[in-house]
Image (spheres, rainbow, N blue to C red):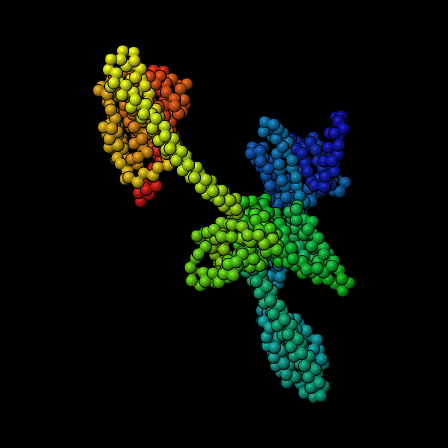
Amino acid sequence: MTQHSAPEQAFKTIFESVPGLYLVLTPAFEIVEASNAYLKATMTTRDIIGKNIFDVFPDNPEDPKATGAGNLRASLEMVLESRVADTMAIQKYDIRRPESQGGEFEVRYWRPLNSPVLDSRGNVTYIIHHAEDVTDFVKLQQRKARQINDVERVAEQPFRQIWLPITLCLVIWVADISLPAGIAAGVLYIPFICCSIWHRQSGMPFIFACIATILATASYLFKPASQVDLWVELINRGFTLSSLWLVAVLIYLGKRSEISLHETLERQNLVMRGLSVGILDWNIPTGELYWSAKFKEILGVQDKELLPHYNEFTSRLHPEDRARTLKAISNHLNKQEPYDVEFRLKHADGNYVWIHAKGQAQWDKYGRPQRMVGSADDITWRKQAQIRQERNSAYLEAITNTIIDGLITINARGIIKSFNPAAEKLFGYKAKEVIGKNVKLLMPEPYHGEHDRYLSNYMHTGNAKVIGIGREVTGQRKDGSIFPVELGVNEMRIGKSVIFVGTIRDISERKEAERERREYMQKLEHSNKDLDAFVYVASHDLKSPLRAIDNLSKWLSEDLPNLNAENQERLKKMQGRVRRMERLLDDILEYSRAGRKTDKSPPIDAAMLVAEISEMLDVPEGFEIIADPSLEGIMIPRMPLQQVFHNLVSNSIKHHDRKQGTVRIAVYREGAEFHFTVGDDGPGIPPEYHERVFEMFQTLRPRDEVEGSGMGLALVRKIINRAGGVVTLKSGAGRGAIFSFTWPLTDSQTMREAA
């Protein structure tokens, strides 16, 4: 005997005890394990383990049409090949009884499911064979079909033909004539009554009654006079015919009721087929459940795939809806609460459909539920739309709740419909305090008093002052304080309703910053005026003694022509330094005013400006200033850029180390900026001095060698920075230096291009 470990033995015990009908097969279809429920349903024992399933369960040899074993083998082979589970249709697969019970085959119907068990490499190691015994269901369906066939067969019997009742009536007439007692006719008219009942036409009993009346009268006339007792015959015939006509009337009324019932049933069937909802009819004591054709259509199943039992309904319920739905049914049956519930049922494709069900039960005189009939409407599309709407609403609510600006919606009468958290923070109100109230609650005068009139005027005329435009207004907090806001309002129409969406931004900090900026600019303007005055006065006061020194040096040169060469050189140096000091004072004055002077002269072509600068400068012989063709047609302001180009070109010539040289000026456009370059072929500037050259009073060569104040490039940087541009230097220890700077396009240039 094979020994199993404790976990394996526990699993084996659990598998054998499961309530379902399960077999475990090898790929060779050998049985390796079976549940107890399977053994019981198939009337077998554990002796089948280790045997081939088709040896244990062969086809019924007495049924030449048996296909159960062949269909099962085909399904198992398909599972081995495709490695995918296969659900078989309902199969007739007879089971052999044990020898103790005769060993004969018993008719059974099954619904099998074969599922593969795969190893890590995807190979089939076992097949789980699950079977559901549906014999009772199939037999119930067959019994109903036989009943319907019997009814139809009876309906087509010759008893419904008129010749049979007439023949019986003739027999009755002959018997009545021959019998001495006419009372016998009353008994023989019973077959006539039966024929009247069997015939489908409701008026036929009266026809038969008329025929019987004529025959009864004729039989009286044909009797010999010796056999006729007038009063006895009259009483006999009167009683017989009265009874006959009374029965005919009763049969007629019964047939009319039957026809009316049949029409009602047909009408109900037509209504049920035309309804868009499914119908359930539950026989509570037996558990039998009727599913209408529409309900089966909703679930996507065929007749044989849906068991007519309440358990089939509960097994299809979504696990999350099961407890809630069963509780609703229980409350209706036991507490007679209304049954109106939404739940999900499993569709044939494995998905779930949403059902809206309503129902009504019937109770007996003891209060016990006997029957429950209900309708089921497929609301999957509505639920999906609802889920999408809820998801969109949650998305919009998340955006509304996280947006940093206040967001308020109002209707056409100014009533607040929504109030987001940012608005709560701005105004100090909770949403529940303002929703349903007029939005003018949040406004100080004069907006408070004018808002309703403005809104009404807009609704009638469409004349907007804020809607779709936006403006700066003031708001009023819950504590009464007033603060500036930037308000934007947009109109939104939903159907025939009008909704206004307002965004509110607190601009208190911006207003305060603007106020501080204005004050700062005013102070700066005063400071600049004071600085200009100081620089001007300082320049003027300093230039006066410089002029005096210059004049004295000139007088000495004129009065003392016989000075030796050394003293003559000293006087020249003094005069040069005086001129340098004057230029320095002029450059300081120009630097202080750089970027603050307004140039009202018209724009000039860049190529023409470079040509003018070339004429203004004292360009030594051997030097050339080249204007690149890219400058042509570029319109730029004259005054600030004239100073920039003048300083850069003169700087290149002044610091050149040779008697011949070239200075090239070019430009290109990038976005909303011009990029200018001024390059030379001079000695170049080492990288460690690239920043230093833009500082005030900085020169790379001694001032005795090169005349200059050291303010030229500092002035260039200040002018360019004030205009919003940037100046850079590209050079090395070798030959040449390139000064590059950006200059933004003017607003008028941008507008012309946009036009």
Q: Quadrant of residue 377?
A: bottom right
Up-down relation of residue 621 to residue 86 (above or below)? above
- Image point 29% across, 17% down: which residue? 572
Instruction: Work out whether residue 183 or residue 140 is closer to the camera in this orientation and state it.
Output: 140
Up-down relation of residue 642 to residue 517 (above or below)? above
- Image point 73% across, 62% down: which residue? 363
Res. 329 visible in picture: yes
Give left or right: position of 613 versus 58: left
Quadrant position of the C terminus in the picture? top left
Res. 47 visible in picture: no
Q: Residue furthest left?
A: 621
Instruction: Work out whether residue 179 or residue 272 is closer to the camera in this orientation and state it.
Output: 272
Q: Quadrant of residue 753?
A: top left
Q: Position of residue 197 (x, y in %)?
A: 64, 71
Count the marks: how many?
0
Q: Position of residue 638 (x, y in %)?
A: 29, 35
- Image point 37% across, 20% down: which residue? 699
Instruction: Work out whether residue 71 or residue 556 is closer to the camera in this orientation and state it.
Output: 556
Give left or right: position of 5 versus 540: right
Q: Position of residue 366 (x, y in %)?
A: 77, 63
Quadrant position of the N terminus in the picture? top right
Up-down relation of residue 341 to residue 91 (above or below)? below
- Image point 64% across, 47% down: which residue? 318
Give left or right: position of 257 versus 451: right
Instruction: Work out whether residue 624 or residue 51 is closer to the camera in this orientation and state it.
Output: 624
Up-down relation of residue 300 to residue 83 (above or below)? below
Q: Position of residue 639 (x, y in %)?
A: 30, 35
